[in-house]
Structures are given as structure tokens and as C-alpha cells.
Amino acid sequence: MKIESITLNHIRMPLVSPFETSFGREVERECVIVAIRSEGLTGYGECVATRDPGYNYETTGTAVHILKDFIAPLILGQDVQDADDFQRRVAGIRGHNLAKAGVEMALWDLLGKRENKSHRELFGGAREKVAVGVSIGIQESAPRLVKSAADYIKQGYQRVKIKIKPGRDVADASAVRKEFPNIRLQVDANSAYTLDDAKILKPLDALNLLLIEQPLFEDDIWDHHKLQEEFSTPICLDESITSPRHARYAIEMKACRVINIKAGRLGGLSQGVMTHDICRENNLPVWCGGMLETGIGRASNLALASLPNFILPADISASDRYYKQDITNERFTLNEDSTIDVPTGAGLGVTVNEDALKNFSLAAIQLNLP
Ligand code: OSB
Ligand code: MG
């Protein structure tokens, strides 16, 4: 596919409700939408970098810089065959996985459109709908959290994840568990603890949680091993797994019993599929994480989560949980069995509402052939 032009659209969208984690509170979400044109087709990708370097070191600002100054020059005017070819071309750029993944997603969308195949077909997805849950940010108080969980459960979500941080952990999780003794419940600390202070999380072991996500720092794979030895609840790694290799390290070190797969964090969908395969070979269940994606990234996540070893419910909620107005014409809705349908159209299977994209745009950079 000869890459004829690339557009980087830095956008900001209001969230339906604020999303608070151990690293901060988001009222609006920023990301970069990548559009790549080739042979009369346009492929779209979502770079899930956030405004602030809280989840990891990347931001929308660093992503635009890396995309414009380093990635685009390597592919503009070039005949890029597929995702593997793209990964070989950008292998000299260290890190910046979220930036790389945004472009890879757009290339998959182009490939699918050219071959008239959905992402699910291209990846070899096994299912037509994906079991999903809802990720609830830190609320003002435990009773408010219970109320929020109750609202989502009423809407049909059968799995609830709550965000925790020091001072807002055991009591919050216990309150939700007490109100909903049978709901599938899990917690996510986003790297807010050290091995020493994670001891206070021990009472979580009595709450029948599906998993405890990323309690320690990103580079603390070995300390997660030590922590896992102390807990009967599975530890799940998110931030720590930045490549398929890191999944292997975590498995070999027995640092976790579950892995959260996000194509962005891993550097692309191809890397997400590879990580899935490594975990599958090692009988380690995975699930698909989320980054409050727009309809573009959500479509991509659904296709990825249709692979067979995505065993636990995904952090993919219905569009109305995030945005009143999305940038895709399609909106995703929750089925009665707490699933969402995987798109079936060519490529990502969604169409972009160019007016909405323009309305949310902070800056658009157009990169053409000289
Ligand atoms: O750690 O999973 C996370 C959102 C932004 C950054 C990090 C995370 C999250 C979520 C949101 O939990 C999940 C979703 O998209 O619904
Ligand atoms: Mg997480």
C-alpha cells in the first residue's frame, strides 16, 4: 500500500462523567486520530495517548511529535505491505508504543478495506460478540461508588472494575462487594503502591475478586512476583506489559496470573495478537483493557477481544458510558447478556463523522508527499 498522505488530528472530547484514577482526574479526553490515505481509501487509527503523562510517559503532545517527525517520514510515499512491515520500519524508534499503535491501527483499517475483510476476520477472531464490563473511576465516597456501580449493573453490566488508590481501596471494594455479593468484581490501582504499602491490600483477598490490576510500578515485574506469592487473588498486569517479551518475563517470573492486553501500550495490534498467543501457549488468561476510546478505538478493541484467549470480560463499555457525541457514526450498545457485538464491516467496520471530528479538533496536521 503506497502511503500517499497522513493526517494527525489532535482532538479533545467531553466525557459523560469525570474519570478519576490513582494518577489523576479526566473531565475531557484527548487523543490523536490518525488518517492514512492510499489507493483511494482512508484508514483510521486512534492513538490512545492522554493529555498528561499519568498512565505512562506518553502524552498527546509527545505522540504528535513522534508521529510527525519520526514515524511519518519512514512511511510517507513508501509501499508499506502490512503490520509486520510497518513494525520493521519503526523498530529504530525506541518506545512510544501508543504513537506507533495509532498508525498500525490505520494500516489495518486500510488493509481490511482493500481486501473487504473485517478486523475480526483479519485477526482470526473466534466470536461475534465480546463479554464486557464497566470501569468505574474513584468517586467522592464509598456510598457514591456503590450508587454508581448499582446504576451500571442496572444497565446490564455483569462485571464491575473499580479504581483504587491508597486511602481509597479496601473500604471502597468492601462496600461494593457487600451490596453486590455475586457481581464479578475487580480492582485497578494503576501503579499506586509499593511492595511495602501493598500489604494493606491483603483484606481484598477475602472479597472474591476476579483480579487485582497493576498494584505496583510499571518496572516492578519482580516485585509483582513477590506480591502474587502473598495473595490468593490473581494479580493482573497492565502498565508493566509493554511488549510481548514482557509478557514472557511476567509468565516466567510468575509475576501475575492474568494479563490485560491493550494494543496501544504494546505498540500495535500485531503486538497485541502476539501477546495473546504467548499467554495462550502458557495457559494464562487475558482480557482487553480500554483507554476511554472513541468509536474508532472501541471497534478495534472489540475485534482484538474476539480472539479465543480473551477469557475475562473486557473494559469495553457502550458508547453512552463515555460520550454523548462520538466521532463515529456508529454507536456501540450493550446486549442483554453484558456483551457488545464485534463490527462486521470492512476494516474497523465504522465510519467517521467528519463534522464531529472537526468540532473536537484542537489541531490538525496534514502530511503530504513532497
Ligand atoms: O488502567 O485500565 C486502565 C483508562 C485510562 C487509562 C488507564 C485505564 C483506563 C481504564 C478505562 O480503566 C477503561 C475503559 O476504557 O472503559
Ligand atoms: Mg489498568
Image (cartoon, helix red, strand yellow):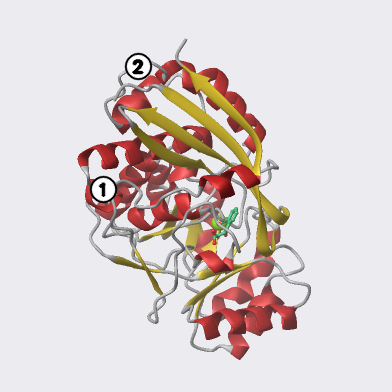
Using the image as rendered, state which of residue 273 and residue 42 is in the foreground: 42
Position of residue 278 measured from the top left corner of the image (x, y, whole percent):
30, 47
Numbered tag placed on residue 78 in the rendering: 2
On screen, residue 304 above or below 61: below
Residue 355 visible in image: yes
Q: Is residue 264 above or below residue 210?
A: above
Indicate whether 367 appears above or below 247. above
In the rendering, at what x and y percent does residue 24 appear?
A: 73, 54
The quadrant in which the N terminus is found is: top left
Q: Residue at x 24, y 46 (%)?
A: 122
Quadrant of ligand 1 in image: bottom right
Q: Which residue is mark 1?
A: 123
Question: Image check: 198 left or right of 39?
Answer: right
Type of residue at label 2?
Answer: Gln
- Mark 1 Cα shell of 10 Å, populated few (<14), some (14-19), many (≥20): some
SS for tag 2? loop
Mark 1 lies within 8 Å of ligand 1 (Cβ measured): no
> Mark 1 or 2 closer to N-term?
2
Relative vertical location of residue 66 with respect to residue 302 in this rendering, above or below: above
> Please, what is the three-letter code of the amino acid marked with disc 1?
Phe
* Disc 1 and disc 2 in contact, CB within 8 angstroms: no
Distance from disc 1 to disc 2, alpha carbons, whole Å, reads 24 Å
Element at label 1: helix
